[in-house]
Image (tube, helix red, strand yellow):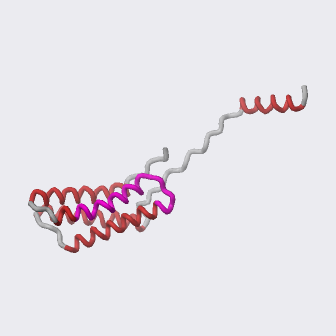
Amino acid sequence: MSCDAVASLAFFWLAATSPVSTPAPAGPALSVAQEPLFADIVSRAGALKAEIDAFRGKGELPGAAFGDQIRKLSDLDMQGHLLLAQRGTDGDLKCILRGISQDLPLKLTALTEAPTPKARDLAMREMAYLLNDNVEVITAPPAPPV
């Protein structure tokens, strides 16, 4: 038997009997909730949700300062989206933050332009849900990579 034949047989034998190597499992995904930008978003969104809930309970409309804070939160959500995009993060959080950033001004407009008390209450409820979502998507434990 030639050396080439022996080498080929040895190669195939080793390939067939060696354990299959599987990639090491990825470490746990890290939450961004502790990073300053995302912690600020969570803090602001939580405070604004409590504020809109209080206004809703009294049947009052929030003032201009509330609108200013909603616009600032919208800007921060977009900054979070851009930061995750810059990192090359390919996850839901990046897209959700962009969506929330776009939805907050729309919900604010719906709230300020609501023609009836019933429409105003619905707009407040939707704003409260969106603010709550803003907190929960950031503080939820990251899903393992698929």
Say which residue appears at 21% left-offset and 64% top-offset: 109
Say which residue appears at 33% left-offset and 62% top-offset: 101
Lateral position of residue 4 relative to residue 74, left or right: right
Front residue of 111/133: it is: 111
Lateral position of residue 105 relative to residue 57, left or right: right
Front residue of 46/102: it is: 102
Q: Quadrant of residue 76?
A: bottom left
Say which residue appears at 41% left-offset and 64% top-offset: 80
Q: Quadrant of residue 74?
A: bottom left
Q: Which residues are magenta?
A: 85-108
Image position of 14 with respect to 106: above or below = above
Say which residue appears at 38% left-offset and 53% top-offset: 140
Residue 14 lies in magenta, yes or no? no
Percent position of residue 128, x then y = 23, 59
Lateral position of residue 107 relative to residue 79, left or right: left
Percent position of residue 22, x then y = 62, 40
Quarter containing the N terminus: top right
Lateral position of residue 36 relative to residue 46, left or right: right
Percent position of residue 24, x then y = 60, 45
Residue 90 lies in magenta, yes or no? yes
Image position of 2 with respect to 42: above or below = above
Percent position of residue 2, x then y = 90, 28
Front residue of 85/51: it is: 85
Report the magenta stretch's main SS: helix
Q: Quadrant of residue 66?
A: bottom left
Q: Given the current orientation, which residue lies at the most extreme top position?
A: 1
